[in-house]
Each structure stands twice: as C-alpha cells, then as structure tokens.
Amino acid sequence: MLVHFIDTTFLLSELPEKVGIAVSGGGDSMALLHVAKRWSDLSGVSIEAVTVNHGLRAEAEDEAELVAGFCTQIDVAHTVLQWDGAQARGNIAAAGRDARYQLIADWAKARKIDGILLGHTADDIAETFLMRLARKSGVDGLSMMDIRFERNGVEWARPFWQQERAELRDYLRRHDVQWVEDPTNDDDAYQRPKARKAMVALEPLGITTEVLKSVAMTMQFARSTLEHYTTEEARRVAKCVAGDVLIAQRARPPVPPEIERRMVIASLQFVGGGQYAPRADALIEMDAGLSLSGKHTLAGCVVTADKYTLRVAREFNAVKETVVGLGHIWDNRWQVLGPAKSHFTIRALGDHIKDVPDWRETGLPRASLMATPAVFDGDTLIAAPVAGYKNGFDARIVADFESFLVSR
C-alpha cells in the first residue's frame, strides 16, 4: 500500500505529533494528501496541508481553492501562503523554489509541525537527471534528490520517490479525487516538459524512469563517498581561523583534484552561506583570477592564494548591511556574547577597524577582520572581539567547518 511509504520514508524512530503536507493541486501532491489522510487515520498523527500561491499564473488561485475544498471534504486543516512571484528577478524558477521552502518552513515552525512531506516522484528524479545532464553536471548534479533532508530549520521527506506519476494518477481515479494539470507541463519554453518528451523517445533504448532513477541513486552513493573523503582530507589540510577557511596548497601526500575542488566549494558555502555550490564556469573564472592576481571574489567571499595557502574569507560588501540585535546569530555563523544592552547591535566591523589600534596583533588580514562581527551603540564602536578589541565581549562561530562538512 502507498500508505506504508510514508512510514518508511519519513519516520526514523518514533511517530511525530504533527506533519505538514505541501499540496499544489497537481496529481502528485493530491495523491500525497489523500494517502497522508489515510495514514493519519491509521497512525493517529495529525496532518495539516499547505499551498503556496506564487502569483505567477492566473490559475494558481483556483488551484489553491481546489485544494482548500478537498481539505474541507476530508477534514484536514489547510493554509494558503502568498508569494508575489511577479516581483522576482533573475532565475524565477529558483527564486520560487527558495520562496516556497522558506514560506512553508516558517509556517511549519509557527504551527509546531515536525516535518513536511513533498510529492516528488520517480519521474521527477528521472527528468531532473536528464535536465542536469544537459547542463554537463557532474556527480553531485546527477545524484538523486534526497529522500530526507533538512532545510530552513525544518525536516522534509519525499515518500513517493519510488512511485511513478502514472501510478499516482491511477490511484486518484480509483478514489475519485480531482487534480489540476499545470499548463506549463506542456510548454516547451520550460526544460521539464522537454525532459518528459525525451523520456518517451528514450524508452525504446531501455532508458526508462526506473533506469534513470537507479543511475541517479548510484551517483548519490558516489557523492556520499566523495563527501566522506573530502571531510577526511579537510581534517588534514584545512582549518578555520576567525571565520576564514585556510587550505594548505602543498600538502604531502597531495590532495586529489576532485577532493580539493569539493573542499574549496564547501569553504565558499560555509563562509558565504550559499545554499547551492557555485557553477562550474564561475569556479573556472576563480581559478583564472587567482592565477593572475592571487585574489578573486565569488559567492560572497574573497578568495586569496599564494604558493602555500588558499584562504576563503567573507566579503565585507556582502555583509555590510547585515544588522542584528545582541544575542542573535549574525551572518548565519557568528554569535556575540557579552553584557546585555537592548540598544546594542551587531554588524560588520568595516572601516571602524581604524578605531581598533591593535588589530594587526591578531595576525589576520585587514579585509577578513572588516567582515567580522562588531558591537555598536548607534555608530559608536563598542567592541570588535575578533579584531582583539573585546571590551567584555566575545565572538564565536556557532558551527565549525568540520561540522558543516559532516552535516551536508
């Protein structure tokens, strides 16, 4: 029974108290909602449904109403979250995906929901594989999407990763459940509809959804192995100093090129806070910049290199507008501790480094220190703990580089 996929995919050791179901109104998510309701009735676990209206299509509001009506019919609480997709710039699909995760995560935390179920299927895995293959992706890009993962402080799971889309449609027909078809699914302006058509053309060669899912799973195993050895090598040749990551360039024995590349990418994500690794062409440009001048800016980081060390530091311009109250996490990495004053704020030290006469004694680069947290009372510098001006305050990284590598 499909119901059991929720148990085996989402649950680790004990039943959660409440689970959220992300529902768009499409066939996959409507099947998930129907199955989740049956699972809820059997297990006693409470469920709530959530729909994000992205505002990009006129039909989106009607789709949200369809979900709301079905939730009323089966007695499941339902919430519609709004995102103004018309205001998004750049990669709209990526912006929409990030916004959905953030909106749903915030909703889940407010509702005390233990985790979110998503309706991705084996077809999504196969189509994504083809799309990434067209982009010349490597092991990471071709790896299967995670069955369970953490994002935005919330646990997520994909219980239907082994089911094919057609099977879920048959399930919905048997149970007389309506769903909507996103018109963009037939629009060749988007990559996924092209991938679906390619799947039909590839089937005579034996390249089926099941085959591509299997290959993606194999790539996931390979990725896990590479990440393990990246962590092992990082323990040997990398260290975190005042928030910067330093990687030895002439280690003996030498670090394999792919492991070194992964270490640099992980450093950029750890320091810069990016959700995704920089693209391959951006990394090539970085290597060229380092060979010419020994310095390059990428992903909110300043990367410098000499013949002994590659240093990944935070870029001041990336954090100069980041301000939090005392006691809050700054730049997703730093916590400043000290005498509590409600009007004190934490922001980057910046040009106020001139007010720290002994900063050179730290042995740290000026540019690195400028991007570290400092305590201010208005525009008056109170403390710059990393730069050596503590004044009763201290600053620490809340999760070190090794912990970051292990948790990815």
Image (cartoon, rainbow, N blue to C red):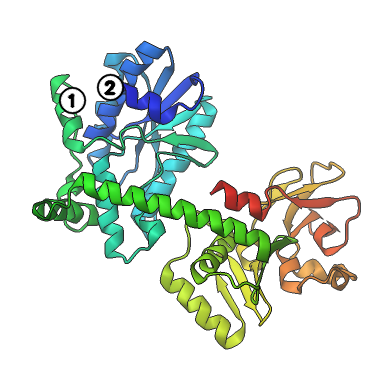
Q: Residues within 10 Å of mark 1 (few under 14, many from 20)?
A: some
Q: Nearer the viewer, residue 381 or 230?
A: 230
Residues under labels 1 and 2: Cα distance? 10 Å
| Residue at the outermost front position | 253
- Name which of mark 1 and mark 2 comes first in the sequence: 2
Q: Residue at x 80, y 55 (%)?
A: 376
Q: Where, by quadrant of the figure, is residue 121 drawn?
A: top left
Q: Residue at x 31, y 35 (%)?
A: 119
Q: 16 above or below 381?
A: above
Q: Which of 249 and 381 is in front in this view?
A: 249
State the mark number for residue 171. Answer: 1
- The type of residue carrying mark 1 is Tyr
Viewer-nearest of discs 1 and 2: 1
Q: Is residue 239 left or right of residue 108?
A: right
Q: Which residue is drawn at 87% across and 62% down?
A: 388
Question: In terms of secondary structure, where does tag 1 sit?
Answer: helix
- The type of residue carrying mark 2 is His
Q: Where, by quadrant of the figure, is residue 351 drawn?
A: bottom right
Q: Is residue 234 left or right of residue 218?
A: right
Q: 355 above or below 109?
A: below
The x, y position of residue 97, in whole percent, is 39, 47
State the mark number for residue 34. Answer: 2
Q: Do the residues labelled 1 and 2 touch (CB within 8 Å)?
A: yes
| Residue at the outermost bottom position | 292
Q: 336 above or below 72?
A: below
Residue 79 visible, this orientation: no
The x, y position of residue 280, in whole percent, is 42, 69
